[in-house]
Each structure stands twice: as structure tokens, then as C-alpha cells.
Image (cartoon, grey):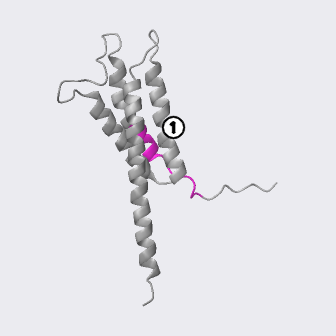
Amino acid sequence: MPRRRGYTDAVTTTVSRLLTWLIAAVIGVVYGTAATVAQAFTIGVLPVGLVLATVGTTALFVALRLLVGDRWTTLAGGLGAILAMVVFSGTGPGGSVIVAAPTPDTEWIPLTWTFVVPIIVALVFAWPDTSRLPAPRKLVE
């Protein structure tokens, strides 16, 4: 019996796409965990941890979007990072806390981090795909 090539290709494409999303989500969880723990680090009044966490997660989401060329992979990575941020920012069932409570001088840092991650994910996800646009025409002199 001959194989149905279109069906096999569709299944392979679907499985590879789902695996890509899963891997992106796991990478997002890893980056989100590291960034959520590190975002509270300051040197004097400089929020070094927040800046590095923002740069790192932005680079991750842009890399996912550029390397895979799929918006949904970026969203999967972003949801993984947001999940890690929510889980590790809260108090555990036994009352333990991974991320220390901010002082009155630094309470804006975790609040900023809470909004930065979803905003970055939304921007990278919504950024238009210009790779399919026609090349600009050169004017003949």
C-alpha cells in the first residue's frame, strides 16, 4: 500500500512544531527562574539585576523569534518565563520565599519586573514579520 506523503509530512510538521514550543517553554522557565531570582540584585542604588534580567530575557525572546521564525515559539518561551516569575515570586506552601522581600527603597524593582516580562513578550510576539515583504526597488539613474 503506498504511503500518503501529505499526511506524513503534516504529522511530522505538527510534532516538530509542538516539540519546538515545549522546548521554548522549558527554556523560558529556566531563564525566567534565573532572572526572577537575579532581578533583586543591586549595587548601591543601581538595579543591576533588573537590567541584566531584562536584557537577558529580551535577548532570549528575540533569538527565539529570529531563529525559529514563529511567533508562537516566542509566546511559549514567554509563557514559561511568566510562569517561573509567578511561581518563584510568591510564598511557598510552607511559608518559604525564594525571592527576598524588597525594602522600601527597592520595592519598585520587583514591581517593574512583574510588568517588564509580559510587555517584552507582547512586543516581540507582535513585531511584524518583514521577511516576506518584497525587496525595495532600486531607482534607475
Q: Residue at x 35, y 42 (%)?
A: 80
Point out the stretch of residues depicted in magenta. 119-133
Image quadrant where one finds the C terminus: bottom right
Residue carrying label 1: 59
The image shows residue 27 at horizontal and vertical percentages of 42, 43
For residue 83, side relative to residue 71 (left or right): left
The image shows residue 123 at horizontal and vertical percentages of 44, 41
For residue 71, side relative to residue 132 (left or right): left
Residue type beneath disc 1 = Ala
Above or below 88: residue 63: below
Q: Magenta span has 86?
A: no
Q: Nearer the viewer, residue 6 or 117?
A: 6
User: Which quadrant of the structure image shows residue 89?
Assistant: top left
Q: Nearer the viewer, residue 30 or 60?
A: 30
Q: Residue at x 26, y 23 (%)?
A: 97
For residue 96, side relative to residue 105 (left or right): left
For residue 131, side relative to residue 42 (left or right): right
Would you say residue 98 is visible in this rendering? yes
Q: Residue at x 40, y 38 (%)?
A: 30
